[in-house]
Image: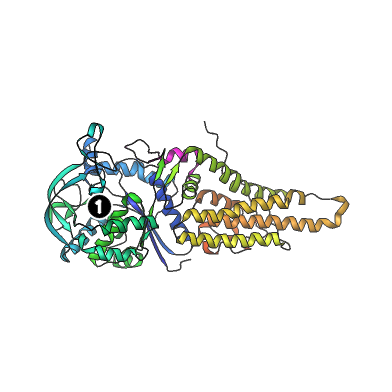
Amino acid sequence: MTSGRSFYITTPIYYPSDVPHIGHGYTTVAVDALARWHRQAGDDTWMLTGTDEHGQKMLRAAAANGVTPQEWVDKLVSEAWFPLLKDLDVANDDFIRTTQERHERSVQVFFQALYDRGYIYAGEYEALYCVGCEEFKPDSEIVDGTGPFEGLKVCAIHSKPLELLQEKNYFFKLSEFQDRLLALYDTGFVQPESARNEVVSFVKHGLKDLSVSRSTFDWGIRVPWDESHVIYVWIDALLNYVTAIGYGSDEAEFERRWPAHHVVGKDILRFHAVIWPAMLMAAGLEVPAGVFAHGWLLVGGEKMSKSKLTGIAPSEIIDVFGSDAYRFYFLSAIPFGHDGSFSWEDLAARYHAELANGFGNLASRTTAMIERYFEGIVPVPGEYTDADREIQQLVAGAAAKADAAIDRFRIDEAIDAIWTIVDELNGYITDNEPWVLAKRRPERAEGDDAQRARLGTVLYTCAEGLRALAVLLSPVMPVSTEKLWVALGAAESLGRLQDQPIREAGAWGVLKPGTSVNGLAPLFPRVEQA
């Protein structure tokens, strides 16, 4: 079921210095849903995630905990980051760690190539550095401290004092790429429009050459021609996108996969949309397919942050509502690319209204009525009425709209399109009253056959609509849609859910009459919150 069309998509590689919060989970499930959709469409899909494990911040955290940096990152990844993927039902194809030999070796190959091509030179540097950002800060992100930090320069993002660093470093000639980058942005390389405008404005103000090595600590990848330096952690981190797919080690795999679609939080947009494509241009490689920057998750009006105690662990939500509800809520409630606010009240309201009473109730009552009125066998539809054909057209249209929205990385719009099927089918059941059609009328025995045929058509329409919903929603909610697929008997007659061609999900008449329907426990049980 492969079309040969390559679709390589990445999350940022996360800095595992602390436990993951729902912002990390949000990015990860968004990329997973996009990858699942393309995989199910038959595209040659590859999803990468991973962890960025070098840098001064990690070195200091390890020292504070009395362990080596490698012991520290091993503990963080195994105890917090691998479980996150499992808890969120993420089907990533690869997980790269920047401490792996495959990464370190290929980073040195790339860095040497930049040097050999004349884009790296030695120089001296003095600037204000934020350990939290692992970045020399531009003037726009340096502010005067207040309170205990009065009289100091602090990072506008972390609100912590900056360190004045003076080092002999190696520099990358970023300043040479201004015109080429601006031309790249005209191609739609950065999405959404607000992110593109921000990057264009930044680059038009002029680019300075970038310090790309550090010599005051050793937790990092050595500069291949000067072992007294380690490669700047952001350069090291960005290169994961090519080292994971064979750059410097497996040319055929690299050719097959590259270029990638990058999904990032807007706070790291500049690295991905300015520094990264410039590095690739300098190395003579193709730039990424695009960079999509999503917004921040706000809690109480503030960007989520462990340091400001607004971080919420994904498990706090999953333990109550389940992973499917987590995935559905964040991917549908927030327009992808915009900031969004999280609240427990909104989550609970949407869970009950849209999942329990909407989708879950539709699935439960359809399967229950087929069991009650047709002994658990999907009925043969009779002659279709205009109302039935409207449902068929709606399903086809919703599937096409959803696929078009996914191509624009608008997962929220895709879910909105699919959800029209849920709403219309619930209304269709109310209008057609199958429970009334199921009643035999002794005084009008000659009408029973027609009434029975109509009942079969109505319930087939509902079951076939649910078949389409299971396929279309499986990238977003893999657990509940799998349960529904089994309950519809589709696993026996049509094969695995993940093998169903998603771009053909809107075709009508796929679920075979005569299929045995199985009992279905509530997909989204009511949650009583304390």
Residue shown at 64%/55% (left/top)?
Answer: 463
Percent coordinates x, y for residue 138 in the rendering: 23, 49
371 left or right of 265 in image: right
394 left or right of 322 in image: right
Percent coordinates x, y for residue 186 in the rendering: 34, 65
**Is 374 within the magenta?**
no
Q: Which structural element holds mark 1?
A: helix
Residue in front for this viewpoint, 14 or 183? 183
Percent coordinates x, y for residue 17 in the rendering: 29, 42
Residue in front for this viewpoint, 151 or 313? 151
Name the residue carrying label 1.
234
Q: What's the amino acid at mark 1? A: Trp
433 left or right of 393 in image: right
Range of magenta residues: 301-323
Residue shown at 76%/58% (left/top)?
Answer: 453
Residue in front for this viewpoint, 194 or 502? 194
29 left or right of 285 in image: right
Residue shown at 77%/52% (left/top)?
Answer: 437
